[in-house]
Amino acid sequence: MYVPYDLSKVKVLDLSQNFSVDSPPFAFYEGPTIKWVKKIAFEGVNAQLISSTNHIATHLDSPYHFYDPGPDISGIPIDTLVGPACIVDLSQFGIGDYDIYGPEHFEKWEQKTGIKIERGDILVIHTGYHHYYNEDWYKVHNDEKPDLPRSFLRHPGPQRVFCEWVLDRGIRWMAIDAISTDHPFNTKVRVARPDLIPEVEAKIGMSMDEAFPWMEDYQCTHTLLFPKGVFHAENVGGQVDEVLNQRVWLGCFPFRFKGGEAPSPASSPSWKSGEIRHSQFRKTPRTPRRQERQGVIVQTGRDALPQYGTRQDFFGVWNPDKTPRL
C-alpha cells in the first residue's frame, strides 16, 4: 500500500476554459446543445442531456483524431499524461496576429530563462490568445475582452520545421492556449475565410503555398506528429498565466473514452504550492509507482510529486518553490 503525499498545503490552479452552451465550435463543426430533461420543481432532481461534437473548449486530441491506428483516448497510458512540463510564453517575444513561431523562439526561451526543455518533457505553448476566448474566465492579469474572430482566426502557429524540432527534441506531448496547435491558415480556416488570405500573406511575408503547402504540410502538428505518438491538448487557459516561464509538473486526465478521438466537454484544474519544498520529497521511493484509488491518482518515485483528479477531464499543474529536474 502506497500512502499519498500530504496535499494540505497545495494551492489548486485551473488551466481549463469554461464549457457551456455558448462554447464555440471549430470551423465546420457543430456546437454543443444542452437540454433540461428533469427539473427539481417537477421531478425532484435536476438533469441535463448534452449533445456536442468533440474539440469544444479545453480538450485532448488523441492520435486517433488524424491517425487511424491510434491510440484512442483510452489507449493513452495515464503515466504518459503526467510529467515535467515547460510553460513557454511566446508573447514576450512579440509573437502576435498571424505570426509564425519556430524552433528559434523556444531556443531563445531556453537562453533567456536558463531552463532546458528536456527529452520527455511536456511542452506548453502560451501565446496569450486564450484571453480572447469567450469562455476564458480568469481575468486577473489582463483586461482583454472576448474577441472570437481574433481567437479563432489570428492566433500564431508553426510550420513543418517546428514539428521536426519537436520530434528531434523528444517532446512527450504538447498543450497550447489557442484554438489549435496549428496556424489557423494551415487548417480549414483557410477554406472558411479565403477573404483573409491576402492579409495573412502580407503579415507573414510569403504565400500560403510557401508557408503551408497543402496537402503535404496540412495541419502538420496533427498529421506529422500523431503518427509519431506526439499528441496535444488545445484551448488551455484559465490560470495558465500563473505558471509562465517555469518548469512544473503537469497532468491531463481525460475520461477513458473507448474509441474516442478526443473527449469533450473537458475541464482542467491545476495546482501549485508556494510552501512545500522539494527537500520534503527526497526520501521518496526510487522506483516509480502509481496508485489509483477513490478518484485519486498519485505518482510516486524519483523526484515525483502529487497528481490527482476527480473531474471528467483533468488538466493539472503542480509547481513547488524549487521545481525538480528529472
Image (cartoon, helix red, strand yellow):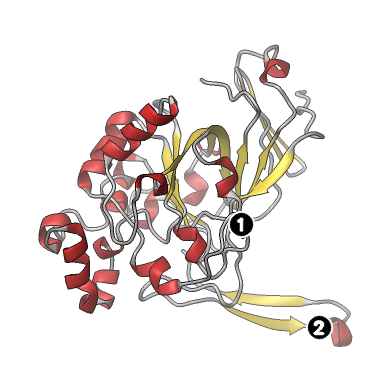
Q: On the image, which quarter does residue 28 sit in?
A: bottom left
Return the disc, 1 or 2, that comes first in the chain's sequence: 2
Q: Residues within 10 Å of mark 2 (few under 14, many from 20)?
A: few
Look at the picture and state if 103 lies above or below 56. Answer: above
Q: Position of residue 112 (x, y in %)?
A: 39, 30
Circle on res. 267: 1
Disc 1 to disc 2, how far (Cα)?
25 Å
Residue identified by numbered label 2: 39
Q: Quadrant of residue 7?
A: top right
Q: Amino acid at mark 1?
A: Ser
In the displayed structure image, the side of residue 213 where residue 175 appears, left or right: right
Q: SS for tag 2? A: loop
Tag 2: residue type?
Lys
Name the spot of residue 310 as percent of width and height, x first: 71, 49
Relative to 291, say whether 264 is above or below. Answer: below
**Residue at position x 66%, y 77% from top?**
49
Left or right? Give the position of 236 relative to 137: left
